[in-house]
Amino acid sequence: NAGVTQTPKFQVLKTGQSMTLQCAQDMNHEYMSWYRQDPGMGLRLIHYSVGAGITDQGEVPNGYNVSRSTTEDFPLRLLSAAPSQTSVYFCASSYSRTGGYGYTFGSGTRLTVV
Amino acid sequence: SQQGEEDPQALSIQEGENATMNCSYKTSINNLQWYRQNSGRGLVHLILIRSNEREKHSGRLRVTLDTSKKSSSLLITASRAADTASYFCATDRGAGSYQLTFGKGTKLSVIP
């Protein structure tokens, strides 16, 4: 089924650990992005990519790294997990890098940092 | 920073009634989008309205956009229990901003 696939669905980390959240899409979308969703805060953009090899920071990039070596994959790396990074993370993709199209979201990764 | 702000934060209605949610934003936009999120799930794109459009329909959904007031509304007609979800507006500023900025959402409960 075409769409955005995120793994894992749930993860518990200890403070200071690192990990990578995976995101893959099979729709040949140019644009991909990562959001975090916290209660009462809505969705906030972490990083985004307008194509393979091109990434940029969003509203809350600190503590996260991204890379985009292929059109399909856009992993999000937590360098040294902190309790403030406890959140639900969503990956989203869109057909065009220039906007004007709806986003397709993955089902999310629920991360708890203890 | 939040570009769109939904109002009300929560809405509870009876099945069959209409539900109206509003969204206000601060800067000029290229388009505005509405999304639905069921509890514990990802967001689902509902409808997109461009800055040069005033009204758009999709099934039981009707979206209006007033760029002079920087506001939009989402109307769900003849609501069903399955419409229970959170609804978010998101603004696309275009012009190479490459970002979709979301509001905090309206939580809709439709009581059977």
Image (cartoon, rainbow, N blue to C red):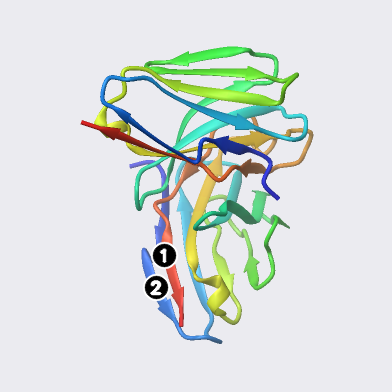
Q: Residues at badges 2 and 1 in contact (C-beta under 8 Å)?
A: yes
Residue closest to the eye, B9 or A21:
B9
x, y percentage for residue A55?
Answer: 70, 56
Mark nearer the N terminus (2 vs 1) = 2
Which residue is tagged 1?
A110
* Residue displayed at 49% across by 65% down: A87
Which residue is tagged 2?
A11
x, y percentage for residue A61?
Answer: 68, 64
Residue closest to the eye, A99 or B108:
B108
- Numbered label tally: 2
* Residue displayed at 46% across by 45% down: A105
Residue closest to the eye, A80 or B6:
B6
Question: Residue B36's image quarter?
Answer: top left
Residue closest to the eye, B13 or A76:
B13
Name the subunit of mark 1.
A
Q: Seen in the image, is B101 located left or right of residue A26? A: right
Q: Helix or strand or loop: what does disc 1 sit on?
A: strand
Q: Seen in the image, is A11 located left or right of residue B49? A: left
Q: Helix or strand or loop: what does disc 2 sit on?
A: strand
Question: Residue B18's image quarter?
Answer: top left
Q: Residues within 10 Å of mark 2 (few under 14, many from 20)?
A: some
x, y percentage for residue A4?
Answer: 43, 48
Q: What amino acid is at disc 2?
A: Gln
Name the subunit of mark 2.
A
